[in-house]
Amino acid sequence: GWGNYFEPYADETDDRYTRVLYDPEDKPRILGKLVKVFADAFASFERTQIAINVPSATFDSDEEKEAYFYECAYDVAMDAGFAIRFDAVENSYSDRFFLKWLLDKYPDAPVFSEAIGWTGDNPGFEAKHKMACDFVHSNTTTFGFYTGNWEYPFYNMNYDFYTESMRPSERFDNLVQGYRLIPEEISFNKEANVNGKIHFSSRWKNVGSGKLYLKYPLALSLIDAAGEEVYFAVREDFDITHTGMQAEYAYSTAFNLPTADVLPAGTYTVRIALVDPYDNNRSAIALPIGENANENRDYEIGRITLK
């Protein structure tokens, strides 16, 4: 009775028969110790996300969900910053699901899911994708296949599921798994004195269902007429992590410009990027803002003239 689904078989003559006898207090105590082993082992791994499995369990009351929360040591795991591995995405849900209660309690937790019951031309394929987005708020979902049906999405659908589901589409109610960060508003002064400031203000929105759970700081750069980067600055306090679906994030700062011997008067192109501090602040996150994009994942937002 310690697993998600495995109950003791009633027939003791069945070779699968198992019986687990334990004190009710032992289960949360022992599971809590096991969870803590992983929490302690990976505590210093900033880029490693440990996930605890959450089954598609349902209960009739919040009291039952609360009891299950402590029985399975979810309190230890979630307080240690674990992510959720949800087992499994179906076609519909209700408020009876333990997962919904857990996500309400820990809204910042990223979710990595597994879909259940997809067999070939099952029309629930699209429904599961919508549920993964709308109810589960998945960063990713693993769809299981078996021999003979894995080719179906490639050759038997009248559209390209894998391409279309990666961007907002009316077919999927414009729902996209994972994060999709859009800077909806950006403003900055178009003129500044040499050795002055760039006053930067922005408003961002996550139109994806999941969350950016790793921190990527904001960088601003100036490009001269020859296409060379002549100024680069990073803001570590920019933190859009855990901004949920349709949630907004406002950020403002000021960038101090160098003296004329370093950055002379002239007109410069202003670019922004979300950068990876573990990769020499290389631009890391693709932003769906159209023509301003380039292969380096940094984005032109205008020009500034230094006087």
Image (cartoon, rainbow, N blue to C red):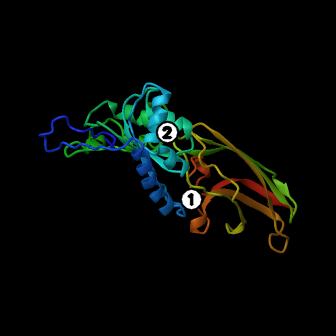
Q: Earlier in the sequence, mark 1 or mark 2?
A: 2
The image's mark for residue 284 is 1
Disc 1 versus disc 2: nearer the observer: 2
Q: Quadrant of residue 281?
A: bottom right
List x then y, in percent, for residue 269: 72, 59
Left or right: 267 as drawn, with respect to 161: right
Query: Is the N terminus in the top left, top right, bottom left or bottom right quadrant?
Result: top left
Q: Is residue 301 visible?
A: yes
In the visual, does 294 lie left or right of 196? left
**72 or 279: nearer the eye?**
72
* Number of the label disc, if any, that sits on residue 137: 2
Quarter occupied by residue 38: bottom left
Q: Residue 8: where, in percent of width, then height? A: 24, 39
Residue 12 in the image: state x and y as whole percent.
Answer: 15, 39
Q: How many marks?
A: 2
User: In the rendering, at what x and y percent does residue 155 appear?
Assistant: 27, 41
Q: Residue at image x 50%, y 61%? A: 40
Is 155 left or right of 29, judged from the image as shown?
left
Q: Quadrant of the C terminus?
A: bottom right
Q: Residue at x 59, y 53 (%)?
A: 293
Q: CA distance from mark 1 to mark 2?
A: 22 Å
Say if mark 1 contacts mark 2, CB within 8 Å.
no
Label 1 SS: loop
